[in-house]
Image (cartoon, rainbow, N blue to C red):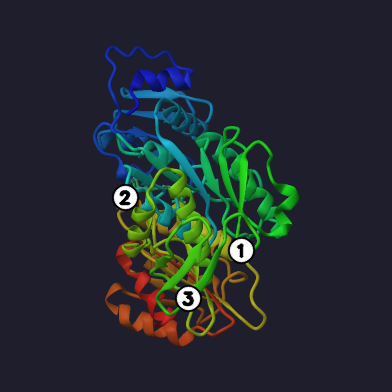
Amino acid sequence: MLTLKEIQRVLQPKNQLVLKEDQAIAKVEFDSRLVTVGDLFVPLKGARDGHDFIDVAFQQGALATLSDRELDIPGIYFWVEDVLEALQALAAYVLEKSQVDVLAVTGSNGKTTTKDMLAHLLATTFSTYKTQGNYNNEIGLPYTILHMPQGTEKLVLEMGQDHLGDIALLSKIAKPKAAAVTIVAEAHLEFFKDRREIAQGKLQIADGMPAGSLLLVPADPMLDDLLPDHVEVKRFGEGGDLCFSNLEENRAWLCFQTNFLQEPLQVPLPGKYNASNAMVAAYLAKAEGVSEEAIAEAFQSLTLTKNRTEWRTAQNGAAILSDVYNANPTAMRLILETFASLDREEGGRKLAVLADMKELGQESDQLHLSMITSLSPEDLDRVYFYGEEIENLAKLAAEIFPLGSVLYYPTKDFEALSQAVCADLQPADKILLKGSNSMNLAKIVEALEGD
Ligand code: 2GN
């Protein structure tokens, strides 16, 4: 892991630091709740300014902190121009000095299975680490890199984009030796003009790749004139370099033949797009040196992460934006703003179920209340609040929302909440669910999805 002197050398802080002896940091954290002894605290600006929590981080045992301003504290700090850029520089440095092979996959809603599959296949043969949850942005990617365990041989990174240029930045930090662009089919991207611009953004995954490295891209002709020429591009899908045939599909299984493996693959997932995802993962794993037997066997034991930000579909057809993974004020604000920016379906409404964010300590009430500035009756037709810590926010919201459009349920009334939401949701509606994992909103998502 990084030592204080390395951090000093990489970041060239503005303050004079006299480090008597060198010491390795335990890990990096930007959420002060997660800081433990020996960590480097990274005060980012989210819903609140992380610099306000530097004291808390030191109380939790932080060894040092970054800061974008001069501080008057007894602890060690690195005064930098921009804390996020410093985090990214540390991540790039860690990759440069390590021997790890980086593989990158562009995430798209619900299709991040490719990343999970690839990591699962590589793990049969190599010490493998991958992006957790939705940590696929300009903060999450460097965080993932810095959390990679000692001895990792293969690192599978998901790269997400909100704006054109996001993936170029991530690729330049990670410099992947191989990568895949998954299908270009999202419906809900607000900052992109059209599918072509989404594709253009995704293809920037090549921007940080060394010359000659491998890039898998859908065979879709729309991408033909967007392809980078410094990497080896292989197209997948019908008419491409990599394709599958003899697809058999049932409710739980896929079985198909690829044009690069001897034996057919059996994948315990439904949906034709999963055959494509599995094929891409298998090709990259094989290119990295995983045997065909190991690939075939690993698919049998595949399990995918479920609790993450993603679009799902209710049994009645309504769109569900489920984000029951990391509950902090920043994540809640970001998802509320994303959801607010979406258009209603014709004749449909927008609903939200917001539950407690846990472990916010004495500031809990204030931090929950501060979400009011991201809640507007123009963007939300009905809001369900669930839990004791969010109760005061519910009361505040009731003052600005029309009568009857704010509903409150205490923790003990989970069943009533679940039944009310299920009964309320109409096919043309969109619904957002957000809260701490322990609030069990995943159960409501399941209930909405039916079997
Ligand atoms: O959206 S994210 O979750 N993200 C992470 C990276 O991958 C993609 C998704 C995200 C989270 C992002 Cl993009 C950026 C940030 Cl800055 C955060 C984040 O962790 N924000 C957090 C806060 C804010 N704002 S974590 C956190 C925890 N903190 C409150 C503010 C906050 C807990 C806390 C509460 C009370 C005290 C101290 C800490 C306290 N101190 N009370 N009394 N004294």
**Which of marks 1 and 2 precedes in the sequence?**
2
**In this rendering, does residue 269 appear at all?**
yes
Of 75 and 101, which appears nearest the observer?
Answer: 101
Q: Residue at x 48, y 49 (%)?
A: 284
Q: Which mark is residue 388?
A: none
Can you give x and y, in whole percent of width and height, for residue 81 in the image?
Answer: 53, 26
Is 446 above or below relative to 356? below
**Camera-side residue of 406 and 358:** 358
Mark 3 lies on residue: 248
Q: Quadrant of the N terminus?
A: top left
> Is ligand 1 closer than 8 angstroms to the Cβ of mark 3?
no
Q: Residue at x 38, y 69 (%)?
A: 268
Is 189 located above or below residue 51 in the figure?
below
Whole-angstrom CA distance, mark 1 to mark 3, is 26 Å
Labels 2 and 1 touching (C-beta < 8 A): no
Is the residue at mark 2 in contact range of ligand 1, meaning its CB lies under 8 Å from it?
A: no
Quarter of the figure that contains the C terminus: bottom left
Alpha carbon distance from label 2 to label 1: 31 Å
Q: Is residue 226 left or right of residue 409?
A: right
Quarter location, residue 108: bottom right
Q: Nearer the viewer, mark 2 or mark 1?
A: 2
Q: Quadrant of residue 409?
A: bottom left
Which residue position is annotated with label 2? Answer: 124
Residue 186's label in the rendered image is 1
* Residue type at numbered disc 1: Glu
Residue type marked 2: Thr
